[in-house]
Amino acid sequence: MPDRRLIIHAGFHKSGTTALQEAFDAQSEELKSAGIIYPNIGRKAHHRVAWALTGRSWGWSKRGGEKTSRKYWDELAKSVNGSKEETILISSEFFSELNGDAIRTIFSEIKDRKVEVIFTVRPLVKLLSSSYQQYLKYGTKADYTTWLHSVLDNPGESKINPTFWMRHFHGRVVARWVDVIGASHVTVIIVDESKPEFLFDCINEYLGLPKGFIKAQKTGSNRSLSMEEISLLIELNKRFPSERDWNEYEIFIRDGYIRRLTDHVQPPKDGEKLPTPQWAIDKGNEVGAQNRRELVATGAKIIGDISSLDSAKVPTGEPMYPEKISIELVAEAMLGFDKNIVKRFPIRWMQDNITNRYKRKIRNEISKLGKKL
């Protein structure tokens, strides 16, 4: 195989992927100087490239969701094949959702490069609450306990969020990649939250970079929600009118109210965090044990303490949702509306809106003229 490499950081969700992507993007020029290209496609991560291969929509498929064009993958593959750089790095946790055919597409369409994949993994129990919060930002209306029953009562199925198990049967996902590109080209890093620097140390070593080269960015985002914020979002999701579409939800709720809170507002130090019931922790660790056995069976290179996958501990308890929230929280959320939001409106939506406004104006003028006559 040639020395030239395409390295795919393929997930998993809620395992430090956002922190790594922010670092790769912020340090892309430094990486380039070190002979590693992190392609700039207008976003910090390469989600659209992954969606192009999965064929999935971004947003609500029947209410304005966007079907991702295959061109995003085609353009990246063409760029990779035409590049003279030795190492190209791409990152999206949505690569973990690829089936065998999509993985074979990557392997067959990337020419004269060794394809490698690296996964970052957290114990299932430790990502339950953060995964739930991520689905809340996608419009889920269920409370945490209802959602936990949906994903854990019969692991592999979920009527509320079916994609959860596409992502989190970690051993099965890794096995799909091993089947296509071989175990020697697949690496799994078990994230150790007690050692925040561990993940970045592993990534630097994997990429052949000095310790401390790639580092966490101070402008990180995507923090956990407080119980007040969770209650607000559940209520917003329940009340969001069915006739309004994904574009409006994404702009005003997901990237308006909620992003304002998570990216710019520090929660109170004494604010309550989302606890997980003991039964869900026990069930999650059972699935974690299954994931551990299946990961070992793949033969992939494993870095870190794999025994942690089925022995995780998180804050335990029954969630209590406040019925009232502070006026300060509501005010901060509303400040998410600024002039930059206008830039997010889809062109078609603006065209239709302007057309309808002019039609109304013309009708009003005709009506006024009729009354004069």
Image (cartoon, rainbow, N blue to C red):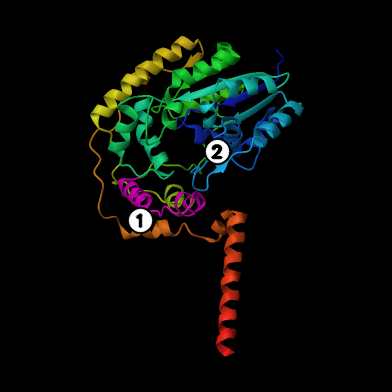
Q: Residue at x 38, y 49 (%)?
A: 237
Q: Residues within 10 Å of mark 1 (few under 14, many from 20)?
A: some
Magenta stretch, overall SS = helix
Q: Considering depth in this image, is 291 or 51 the residue closer to the camera?
A: 51
- Tell me which corner region of the image, top left, top right, bottom left or bottom right, holds residue 369: bottom right
Q: Is residue 338 visible?
A: yes
Height in image: 151 above or below 363?
A: above
Q: Which mark is residue 329?
A: 1
User: For the residue carrying disc 2, how many other residues have a C-alpha within 10 Å: few (<14), some (14-19), or many (20+)?
Assistant: many
Which quadrant: the N terminus? Answer: top right
Image location (x, y in percent) of residue 55:
57, 33
Q: Is residue 226 left or right of residue 166?
A: left
The amino acid type of the residue labelled 2 equals Glu
In this picture, which residue range is highlighted in magenta?
226-254
Q: Which residue is mark 2?
A: 22
In the image, residue 79 sits, relative to residue 207, either above or below, namely below
Question: Which residue shows up at 48% across the image and 15% down it?
Answer: 302
Query: In the displayed structure, would residue 365 be above or below residue 258?
Result: below
| Mark-to-mark CA distance, 1 and 2 | 27 Å
**Residue furthest out toward the bottom:** 372
